[in-house]
Amino acid sequence: MKQNGFFGQWGGAYIPEILHQTFAELTIALRQAQNDPNFWQEYLELMSTYSCRPTPLTFAENLTKHFGGAKIYIKREDLNHTGAHKANNVMGQGLLVKRMGKKRVIAETGAGQHGMATATMAAKFGLECTIYMGEVDVLRQRPNVFWMEKMGATVIPVQDGSKTLKDAINEAFRDWVTNVDSTHYVLGTACGPAPFPEMVSWFQSIIGTEARKQILARHGKLPARVYACVGGGSNAMGIFQGFLYSDEVQLVGVEAGGKGLGSGMHASRLCGHDASPGVAQGYKTMFLQNSDGQMRETHSVAAGLDYVGVSPILSDLAEKGRVRFESATDDEVMTALDLTMRMEGIIPALESTHGFVQAFKEAPELSPDDAIIINQSGRGDKDIFTIAHAFNDPSWKEFIIARAKEYS
Amino acid sequence: MKQNGFFGQWGGAYIPEILHQTFAELTIALRQAQNDPNFWQEYLELMSTYSCRPTPLTFAENLTKHFGGAKIYIKREDLNHTGAHKANNVMGQGLLVKRMGKKRVIAETGAGQHGMATATMAAKFGLECTIYMGEVDVLRQRPNVFWMEKMGATVIPVQDGSKTLKDAINEAFRDWVTNVDSTHYVLGTACGPAPFPEMVSWFQSIIGTEARKQILARHGKLPARVYACVGGGSNAMGIFQGFLYSDEVQLVGVEAGGKGLGSGMHASRLCGHDASPGVAQGYKTMFLQNSDGQMRETHSVAAGLDYVGVSPILSDLAEKGRVRFESATDDEVMTALDLTMRMEGIIPALESTHGFVQAFKEAPELSPDDAIIINQSGRGDKDIFTIAHAFNDPSWKEFIIARAKEYS
Amino acid sequence: MLLEKKLRARLEKNKILLMTHIVLGYPSMAANRQVIAQMVAGGVDCIEMQIPFSEPMADGPVILKANQDSLAAGTKVADCLAFGAEMTARHDIPFLFMTYYNIIFKYGEEKFFKDCRDAGIVGLIVPDLPPEMGENFFKLATEYQIAPVLIFTPTSTDARMAELDKVAAGFIYCVARRGVTGKQSEFGKDFNTYLARCRAATTLPLAVGFGICNRDDVTAITGLADMAVIGSETIRLVDAHGPEAVEPFIAGLR
Amino acid sequence: MLLEKKLRARLEKNKILLMTHIVLGYPSMAANRQVIAQMVAGGVDCIEMQIPFSEPMADGPVILKANQDSLAAGTKVADCLAFGAEMTARHDIPFLFMTYYNIIFKYGEEKFFKDCRDAGIVGLIVPDLPPEMGENFFKLATEYQIAPVLIFTPTSTDARMAELDKVAAGFIYCVARRGVTGKQSEFGKDFNTYLARCRAATTLPLAVGFGICNRDDVTAITGLADMAVIGSETIRLVDAHGPEAVEPFIAGLR
Ligand SMILES: Cc1ncc(COP(=O)(O)O)c(C=O)c1O
Ligand SMILES: Cc1ncc(COP(=O)(O)O)c(C=O)c1O
């Protein structure tokens, strides 16, 4: 990281003056934690007793046979407590919050996973908690909203802008500038003003550290390629960090192709041609914006990928050619999900399934001596309303109609 | 175990003659597996790479403070792949099926967790799969049905009798006697004809073995008490086996008290006075039956506890006084669930929450030097329709009504 | 024992005997009375009366439903025993009870045998009680001279058949195929081999059941077995056409 | 710089100056024209014109909505610059642009400064561009003689204020409280201490903003600060009573 939180030309902290002091203190707390070996120890301890770390690396034997190329391994972040990699980041920030002595946390959420994880952490650490969530996402991910509320969090549906993740982030910042003394903003991905991209990536590096050890033990050598979906970029940064300095490992980030890169309805910032450099939400990165610098609407079947910006660290790694970016369309995602459920009995989140799509495209090109790893960032249970809808399941519809009758 | 699969006076194999040969073969396969150290090794390997074993033992710091007595630890079976301890049994039986060379599996399911787990195992092992589920349970646990179908299983709603678990078991047996050569019946709990109670308990003993090691490492001595909910009894047998021969550890099984033990609407077989010895579904145990030997309707908010019989091994341990049995009502369960979510950020399944209720009642009596363990057999996500309904959540209702409008 | 003797006597007159099945209390005991009278009039040789059970694990949908409806209508075990006594007094053919073990277990084994004997019942079919599980039951059966009918199946090995033969009495119930009651069976070459194995394993009369519906089925097993069992088919018949249809149906079977 | 000089000149005539705020294109540029005319007629000393941005992170609900509606109506950055030129030509008071950094970044920093200068704009307020992030921006500001107005806040330490003062020009915008635009502030004892700290940290004129709604608020800061900033309140007024309500409102503030 360069001075001022830049990665190459990307990143920085473009923040309202009111937050200056808070960011200064946060950065100091982070540096102290990074220099204190007990901190990481405490973090590992928490993650292995409250969540289920190390998460397994599963050999997908049937998919491997089906594609007839590289051995396919799946890193199982879905088995984390609350069902996604988001727990890693949130628990880490929770420990920082304890150190900083703040009593309240806020967070934005898209898929609801980060909100779930934050509400969970707040319950465990006894913190007050408010979650901002775009109204569109509230509708897409209602079960998560219910659980957040049951864990004592207040969930505020954000009705501004595109009513999705970026608007929730804006609203969270508005809360933060108002309640800056009492409150920590638990940003959910490797985006936002410095030191968030670095901090979130640091906590998520637990994925890559484990995965590297596991693949060496199981496969005897490094994988040929590692795949991760990219929303804000935290799960991708998490697993990539295990292999970043091993040049023989290709790192592949998969963005939301939505209805197709040419359709204008997608959320691909680092592949495709619709994004350009910009500064918003406190940092500089590639944004989906028009020529005036106004952010565009994005689209993905996966709420957690439906975001205009992307981690500045990934923009840098893309520019330097260290990470290759691809995209997967909504339709490709549904097909890959179906296959994975049937062949392996595993239900990846819609977000995670984007990584599977690209891995499936490339596995046949590789040799059976090669291994590839797909980072399964979360489980698909949360997506039941979206998935059942997308598969047009008639008995699901009947069920919902019958339930609604009871309620009306 | 006595000759012929009895535990004390309980158990046995009261099976139609057509199954005699199959049971003989199954028993031989089980004995071979038990005598083959590689088998257990393979099982452990599978559970640590496909599921997330060992599952953590979580110290519930806030609940401990709240009750001000014993240290409360939670064994996290909810973090298993598919979200419950059912995975342990199913994966074990899957390995046996592979050895026996059968190509099709069937299973009954109540809460849907065992069906989910079986469908998952069948997908992974490439087996054909049919799941029998009482129609009442299909309605209570629709999301699980959806996922089972997506994993390639056929789910058959059973419309006979009380349309719950016991009827699903009867129907599974009817399938088995018809397709005995090709098919293995993956019984989901420590019930049914021998060798099922022993076999299921054996696979589930992985819970207790881990928990014993974990509590010794964390607490320095054995726990004072261990709590588990009891439906068929498999998760209870699983954890109890870690402590069965340590007399200083009290073992407490918690049954479904439904609307109260005096109401006739419950599923308590080993506490209360409504059950009597009987023989049904292939084994002898305490059944909720009338004086003619006809099975009674049972009730619990938790589909997975809503069952007329109980593991013969637990009937024996109850008779011998080694395990104490208590019950928790539906209302107590909702209160304990609420508390656990808010204080620990953990969502136990409604089944598991029964164990929490009794632990909460007793924790204050014990000293802070004591530890108790609650077996959290599964996660509550699957219960969202039941829980949101029970909490009478208005925005959930609105959401369901809005969804239904789209569909009608 | 009594049952075997009675059957052998009837085999003097007919190359193949007929056993029918009814579920007690379905649709009502009054209807059962009519149906049994029709069966006897139609020339049946033996009747198994099923005492309904809430969990009839080995029965298919037709008999399962009959069990449930009977219980829903309030049928009690004591009523069934009384009805049995009434029938044995009225009709001069052997009557058996068929039921699941829990009914007997809960009633009290010895009391059940005693009451059966008093009711004139000559045999019991309990599909979920293999010999290994029924030590006391089989002792009582000998003591009370009520034949414990056992079941051979296509999956039974020769050794298993021999074991079963040791404790069985009255006749052997050979189920024609895998599965539960009520579905068609095919009587092909494998079936003949199977029945030959059964014949070799026991000296008791052989009854063949599961899916026998019509005269052709009965003809198919004549010469190979001693008795054809008509189960679900009469229930279907009564449901569709009432008790009066039974006599001509039975009479037309051979 | 130009802006400071103009404000100091006006401070000769008034103990407290008034700065108002509008969102360009909301509800329309035609309406903006009327409102600005009213403001000027009402005696305003300075106007900040916000170029709308899709992510106005530091703005509260009123201004946020105005940004979104303006964009939805098709407002372009080029239109805003042209409109600015028109206003500076028509009215003899200092005009500033307020916007978020991405608008400038995307437009091209140097081009933006050049076009601002050509349009007669004398200051820029960019709430998400702290000095650390704007090396080039602040260099260009000096070069093009357009005042980069910076913000002091109640959370700013003395050291931070000193740092900000080094690069700021025109005036310092002191936000009255934590939070976003549009909510009431309380001007109590803490506030006075805070303003005293601001005064000590800079020789630039002090403007106070965030939640100034009426004559009492203006009176409260007179003597402590040099300029009162009326933001969301005029938007609310125009929404409710139309542009004509603006002149009397402004005229009544002091
Ligand atoms: C399961 C899952 N995967 C991936 C993402 C995308 O976020 P990121 O790119 O930060 O990993 C989300 C975001 O909500 C998520 O819930
Ligand atoms: C989560 C969970 N816990 C407990 C049970 C009860 O079963 P058992 O008593 O066999 O553990 C079930 C059954 O479905 C279950 O799903």
Image (cartoon, coloured by chain):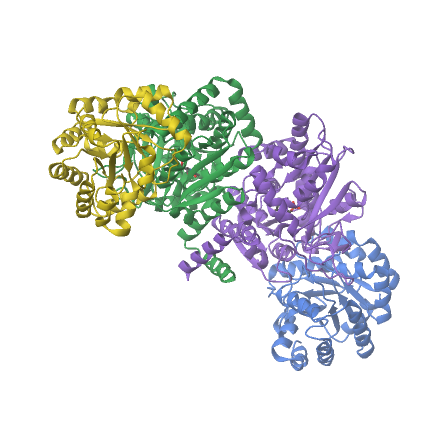
Chain colours: A green, B purple, C blue, D yellow
Q: Is residue A40 above or below residue A106?
A: above
Q: Is residue B200 visible?
A: no
Quarter where residue A279 is shown: top left
Return the residue nearer the eye: A362 or D134.
D134
Q: Position of residue A149 (x, y in %)?
A: 51, 45
Q: Quadrant of residue C53?
A: bottom right
- With respect to residue B117, does D152 lie above or below? above
> Please, is residue A278 above or below residue B182 in the view?
above
Residue B358 visible from this viewpoint = yes
Residue D204 is left or right of residue A361, and the answer is left
Nearer-the-camera pick, D138 or D20:
D20
Residue B151 spot, x, y in % from top left? 49, 47
Identified at 13% across, 37% down, the residue is D85
Question: Where does the N terminus of chain A fall, quadrant-wise?
Answer: top left
Pick the front one: A225 or B402: B402
Q: At which x and y percent is residue C30?
A: 73, 78
Say above or below: B212 vs D249: above
Labels in figure, total: 0
Q: Quadrant of ligand 1?
A: top left
Taking depth in this image into account, of A178 and B377 the one nearest to the observer is A178
Q: Position of residue D211 (x, y in %)?
A: 34, 38
Furthest residue in direction right, as rendered: C143
Residue D8 horizontal side relative to residue A119, left or right:
left
- In the picture, residue C64 is in which quadrant? bottom right
